[in-house]
Amino acid sequence: MSLDQMINSLASFYQQYTLAVVVVAIGLLIMIYRNPKESFKFLVFLLFMAAVIYAIGLFGETVNTGVGGKEQMIHKTEDASQ
């Protein structure tokens, strides 16, 4: 998933669930105002988790591409041997 696709999906999510996004944003702002140190730790944790999920997604795409390539090579070998 490229950065453009991620931005488009976030924009689409915002357009579909505007009220939920606004409520979450207000909640985060209140949290930051009341306890900035804990809020910063929480936001860093969320950023870390987003990076982990993104890396797992990239890894999954790589595995699928490798498996697809391997299957193509197996079928080419089978076709050539017949």
Image (cartoon, rainbow, N blue to C red):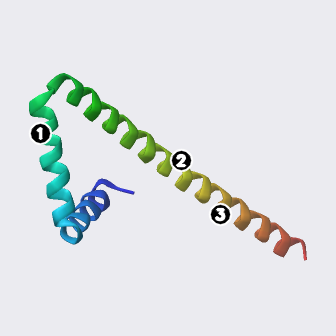
Sequence-wise first label, 3 or 1: 1
| Depth check, front residue: 80 or 33 | 33
Residue 30 numbered tag: 1
Q: Going by the picture, which residue comes out furthest to the top?
A: 37
Q: Nearer the viewer, mark 2 or mark 3?
A: 2
In which image quadrant can residue 23 be found? bottom left
| Depth check, front residue: 34 or 42 | 34
- Looking at the image, is 10 positioned above or below residue 59? below
Q: What amino acid type should be assigned to the residue bearing mark 2?
A: Phe
User: Would you call the spot at circle 3 few (<14 residues within 10 Å), some (14-19), or many (20 or more)?
Assistant: few
Residue under pointer 2: 59
Q: What amino acid type should be assigned to the residue bearing mark 1?
A: Ile
- C-alpha gap between disc 2 and disc 3: 14 Å
Residue under pointer 3: 68
- Looking at the image, is 51 positioned above or below residue 70? above
User: Would you call the spot at circle 2 few (<14 residues within 10 Å), some (14-19), or many (20 or more)?
Assistant: few
Q: Going by the picture, which residue comes out furthest to the left?
A: 33
In which image quadrant can residue 3 be found? bottom left
Instruction: Specify whether 57 is left or right of 24.
Output: right
Q: Nearer the viewer, mark 3 or mark 1?
A: 1
Sequence-wise first label, 2 or 1: 1
Q: What amino acid type should be assigned to the residue bearing mark 3?
A: Gly
- Looking at the image, is 50 positioned above or below residue 57? above
The residue at 20%/51% (across/down) is: 24
The residue at 14%/33% (across/down) is: 32
- C-alpha gap between disc 2 and disc 1: 36 Å
| Depth check, front residue: 81 or 28 | 28
Q: Provide residue 70's location: percent of width, then percent of height.
A: 71, 59
